[in-house]
Image (cartoon, rainbow, N blue to C red):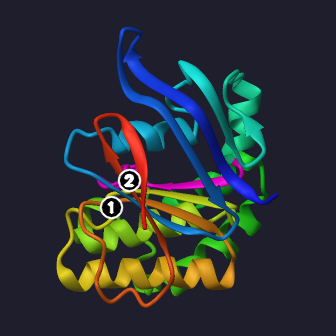
Amino acid sequence: MSNIIHAQNLVLSYKRDEPIIKNTNLAVKNKDFVFLTGKSGSGKSTFLKSLYGELGVQSGELNVCGFDLKSSSKNKLNLLRKHTGVIFQDYKLINEWNVEKNVMLPLMIAGYSKQVCKMQAHKLLKHVKLSHKIEKMPMELSGGEQQRVAMARALAHNPTLIIADEPTGNLDDYSSEVIWNLLKSVRQHIGSTIIVATHRIPQTLGIDYKQYFLDEGTIYEVT
């Protein structure tokens, strides 16, 4: 598959007569690293929600990981989410579960055995340098540590597409650098396509990337 994301004349809205994304066209290729920028309230999060099926398509076309999202049945969305990993600005960890179980969640949903879930969780927590916090609860961690747990969870099922909504928005410079380096590593070693909504592209990323800018409901490529 050459295009992981393909949108044509895409319209998204929460209220039918108040479109947030208007007649947008976009193509993201396999293994692209993409930044989506724009001012607060421009609709970046709205667009990302459509990519994993949280927000339905009002009109136009949207294809993600080979799935046509114009008609989004529950079964189709469940299949899509096996191919996607999502990283949120506010982490969305389950506070009643420890770090290990939070990372295991996508694999548990997919029906893997407990042994496989644990092995993958331990491997990923080592990768994000949090093996020593495996029994901790989310509220016992710093913001940067919680985001690294959230990233490990997003990577648990080796996703084709990683969707990150302001993943460093609440973090200090050190934690932000850790997150960017992890995303670079994932793209290099797993081959995932990565799309990140952010206010600020890091200056020292050191990789080729594409940038799109969202303004007044339309997404433009920055060249």
x and y percentages locating residue 81 in the rendered image: 66, 45
Give the number of the disc on residue 92.
none
Is 48 included in the stretch rendered in magenta? no
Query: Which residue is found at the position 78% from the left and 60% from the top?
Result: 2
Query: Does residue 51 sit above or below 168 in this rendering?
Result: above
Query: Taking 111 as reference, is 142 above or below it?
Result: below
Q: Secondary structure at mark 1?
A: helix
Q: Could you say which disc has been placed on residue 138 in the image? A: 1
Q: Quick check: can you spot residue 136?
A: no
Q: Are marks 2 and 1 in contact (CB under 8 Å)?
A: no
Q: Which residue is mark 2?
A: 88
* Residue interval drawn in magenta: 82-96
In the picture as drawn, the residue positioned furthest to the top comes out as: 17
Q: How many numbered marks appear?
A: 2
Q: Amino acid at mark 2?
A: Phe
Query: Horizontal placement of 114 versus 155: left or right?
Result: right
